[in-house]
Amino acid sequence: MLARVLLPTVVAAALAGCGGGGSGGAGAPAPATAGSADPATTATATAPQPVRYRLYYLEGEHLRAAPAASDAEPTAQQVVEELVANPGGHTTAIPEATEVNGVTSGGGTAVVDLSRAFESGGGSLSMQARVAQVVFALTQFAWIERVTIRLDGEEVEAIGGEGVPARELGREGFADLLPPIFVEQPLEGDAVTSPLTVRGDARVFEANVSLRLETAAGEVFGETFATAAEGAPGRGPFRAEIAFAVDEPTAAELVAYEESADDGSEQHVVRVPVRLCPAGGC
């Protein structure tokens, strides 16, 4: 695995699943306001909101979703280029020398052409992780379900000597790289209004994922639970909404966890910092 820092590049992605359900930072830009309002006020009121989307990196041996934002129109190639450039200096399995030659999509499949450096170095886990990073980044687009990887324009059956498949890849092939509870929405730092939509994937006992909104001081603003499509040892997606009420913007955390059947303790805890907003927004 390789962590690195490169100069940031400004890229964009208007992605399915990033907005709605109270995730204020990911919504579409507000419509223009007609009338004779003061130009400065109008410009502020109608300024496009940043598009929030995900880049996938590593935390230990597991994937994690890292937030990214842009106000430009999206392309799949820009997302892959930013993933490879790693402007945030996250831990990544993608070799530093990797270059993105191009990304095309059609019929639900994205074809990613990367330089041969992509398959250099690392063992089996590293090779699987770097492929998974690309697959997860691209399949967040609503129109991409599968990913095929080429190396310097050539079709390949597998990546590296470990033989990680390179064709028609979906997320289900990389379930072992996900933590027991994998939260994709909200993203860290999202400004959210009630109800907050929580979305992710889990492998937990009886498929139950407990959810709580709380401040650092322990004040609880809302609790609920989600049921994954399948319980352990299988795993499946989950979705839930948490209603809350605040009078002013409030720093909080979404806490997702599995409640132990033995002693009620919280296991596989995931914490996502968010900003709770009143009904009118932050």
Image (spheres, rainbow, N blue to C red):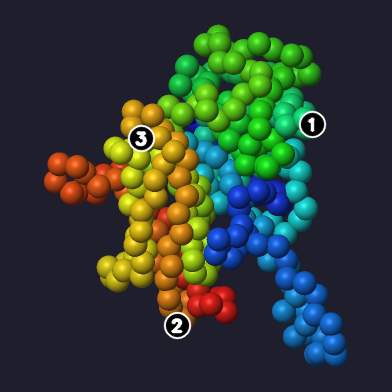
Which residue: 36% across, 58% down? 224
Mark 3 vs mark 2, foreground winner is 3
Please name the residue that numbered disc 2 is placed on: 247
Q: Nearer the viewer, mark 1 or mark 3?
A: 3
Label 1 residue SS: strand
Distance of label 3 from label 2 (alpha carbons):
38 Å
Amino acid on which the number 3 mark rests in the picture: Gly
The amino acid marked with disc number 2 is Asp
Picture residue at 18% right of the left edge, 49% below the top: 264
Q: Name the residue under label 3.
A: 231
Is the Cβ of the residue at disc 3 closer than 8 Å to that at disc 2? no
Towards the viewer: 190 or 169:
169
First-in-chain label (1 vs 2): 1
Q: Is mark 3 on a helix, strand or loop?
A: loop
Q: Earlier in the sequence, mark 3 or mark 2?
A: 3
The spot of residue 14 in percent (x, y) is 70, 52
- Residue 172 horizontal/vertical position (percent): 52, 28
Q: Which of 101 and 274 is in front in this view?
A: 274
Q: Residue at x 71, y 18 (%)?
A: 151
Residue at the location (58% across, 43% down)?
55
Image position of 55 with respect to 26: above or below: above
* Label 1 close to label 2 by CB (< 8 Å): no
Image mark for residue 220: none
Name the residue that disc number 1 marks.
106
- Please tell me how crowded label 1 is: few (under 14), some (14-19), or many (20+) other residues with Cα within 10 Å: few
